[in-house]
Image: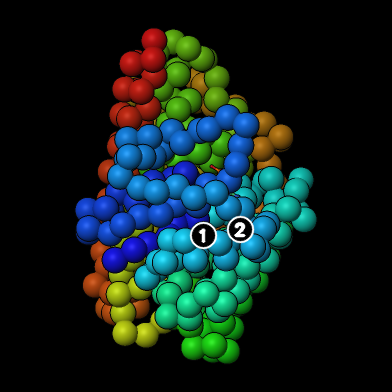
Amino acid sequence: MRALITGITGQDGSYLTEFLLSKGYEVFGVVRRASTESFERIDHIKDKITLLQADLLDQLSLISVVEESKPDEIYNLAAQSFVPTSWTQPVLTGEFNALGVTKVLEAIRLVNRKIKFYQASSSEMFGKVRETPQTEATPLYPRSPYGVAKVYGHWITINYRESYDIFATSGILFNHESPRRGLEFVTRKITNGVARIKLGLDDNLALGNLDAKRDWGYAGDYVKAMWLMLQQDKPDDFVISTGETHSVKEFVEEAFSIADLDWKKYVTKDPRFMRPAEVDFLVGDSSKAKKILGWEPEYDFKGLVKLMVEADIKLLGEKR
Ligand code: NAP
Ligand code: GDD
C-alpha cells in the first residue's frame, strides 16, 4: 500500500508515518519549500520515506505529487492549525484550511478517483456547542476563522463523496496532544513551562483562559483512527475523542503536581492569551467510532499529562 500525507512534518503527520510504516506502507510526504529545513519530528524516519515538494496554495504542485506518488490513500493533515493565528491571518487560514482541501480533492478527481481520502476535521467546528456530548450529528457553530475554514473543509469532503463517489472521509478529531505538540498550544506550553521551572530556567508561566474545557487525548492513539476510517467498506464521518473533559486549570494542577511544584506560585494570567471569541467547552462522544472502527484510546488524561511532563523534563535536561 502507498500513502501520501500532507502535513507530514507536523505532530500528527509524524505519528501517522510511524504507524503506516509499521503496517508495511510505502509513505510519501508533502513538504513545502523553506529557506531552512526543519523536519525535527520526522528526522528519525526520514530515510524510510519519500518527501515531495508541494503547497496547499498551489493546485498544480498537488496534482504533480499525486501523479508521482500514485497513492492508494491520501491523508490531508496540512493546515494552519493554531487557532489564535486564524484571527491575525484569516485569509491565509481560509486558503490553507478551506480551499486547500478542495485542491487536494480536485487532484484526486483529476488523477485517480479510486484514491481514498482522509480530511483532518476538528472539534473546533462545534465551537459554541449546541449539544453535549458532541457527535457526528451535532450542529456546527464555529467560533474562529480556523473553525469556519474547517467547516468548509468538512463539507467539501462530504460533497466530493456525494458528487463524484470518491471515498472521502472526515475525521472530527478532538484535541490530541503529545511530546511532539507545538510549543504554543496550551498543553505543551504548560508541560514545557513546568519543565523549565523544575530545572530552574524560569519562574513564571503566563496563560490565558484557565476555565476553558477540552477533551484531550493522545495523538498516537488518534492517528490509528485515521487509518481505520480508510479501511472501511464505505466512507463516513467519525468523531474521535476520549469522552472526558478537563479545564486548562486542571491540566495545570496535574502537570505541576507531577513535578512536585505548587502551580499557584508560578502561574499568572495574561490578557494577551485571551481570544476574541472562545470555545468554552468540548466533550466528544465517539461511540460510532468505537462500534464501527473498533477504536479505543489507550491514554487517559492523567496518563497523557504524565507522558508530556516527563518527556519535557527529560528533553530539557538533555539539552543543558
Ligand atoms: P501541526 O503540527 O501544526 O502540523 C501542520 C502541518 O501542516 C505541518 O506539517 C505544516 O508544514 C503543514 N502545512 C501548513 N501549511 C501548509 C501548506 N500551505 N502547504 C503544505 N503544508 C502545510 O498540526 P497537527 O496538530 O499535526 O494537526 C494535523 C491536522 O489535524 C491539521 O489539519 C489540524 O488542523 C487538524 N486537527 C488537529 C487537532 C489537534 O488537536 N492536534 C485536532 C483536530 C484537527 P510546515 O512544517 O512546513 O509548517
Ligand atoms: N494556546 C494557548 N495558550 N491556549 C490557552 C492559553 C495559552 O496561553 N491559556 C489558555 N488557553 C486556552 C485557550 O483559550 C483554549 O480555550 C484552550 O486553552 C486550548 O487552546 P489550544 O491548546 O491553543 O488548542 P485549541 O483548542 O484552540 O485548538 C486545538 O484543538 C483543535 C481541536 O479542537 C488545535 O490543535 C486545533 O488545530 C484543533 O483543531
How many residues crowd mark 1 within 10 Å: few (<14), some (14–19), many (20+)?
many
- In x, y percent, where is residue 40? 43, 33
In the picture, residue 58 is in which quadrant? bottom right
From the viewer's perspective, is 6 left or right of 130? left
Q: Residue 37 carries which label?
A: none
- In x, y percent, where is residue 316? 39, 19
Q: Nearer the viewer, residue 34 or 215?
A: 34
In the picture, residue 90 is in which quadrant? bottom right
Amino acid type of the residue that numbered disc 1 sits on in the rendered structure:
Val
Q: Quadrant of the C terminus?
A: top left
Tag 2 and tag 1, C-beta contact below 8 Å: yes
- In x, y percent, where is residue 185? 53, 41
Task: Name the residue: 40% across, 66% down.
Answer: 71
Q: How far apart are marks 2 and 1 (CA)?
A: 6 Å
Q: Nearer the viewer, residue 98 or 52?
A: 52
Amino acid type of the residue that numbered disc 2 sits on in the rendered structure:
Ser
From the viewer's perspective, is 197 left or right of 109? left
275, above or below 225, in the image: above
Helix, strand or loop under label 2: helix
Q: Name the residue under label 1.
A: 65
Task: Name the residue: 32% across, 30% down.
Answer: 311
Q: Nearer the viewer, residue 88 or 77?
A: 77
Q: Quadrant of the N terminus?
A: bottom left
Helix, strand or loop under label 1: helix
Q: Which of 102 and 27 is in front in this view?
A: 27
Task: Name the residue: 50% across, 56% down.
Answer: 6
How many residues crowd mark 2 within 10 Å: few (<14), some (14–19), many (20+)?
some
252, above or below 169, in the image: above
Q: Which mark is residue 61?
A: 2
Q: Is residue 274 visible?
A: yes
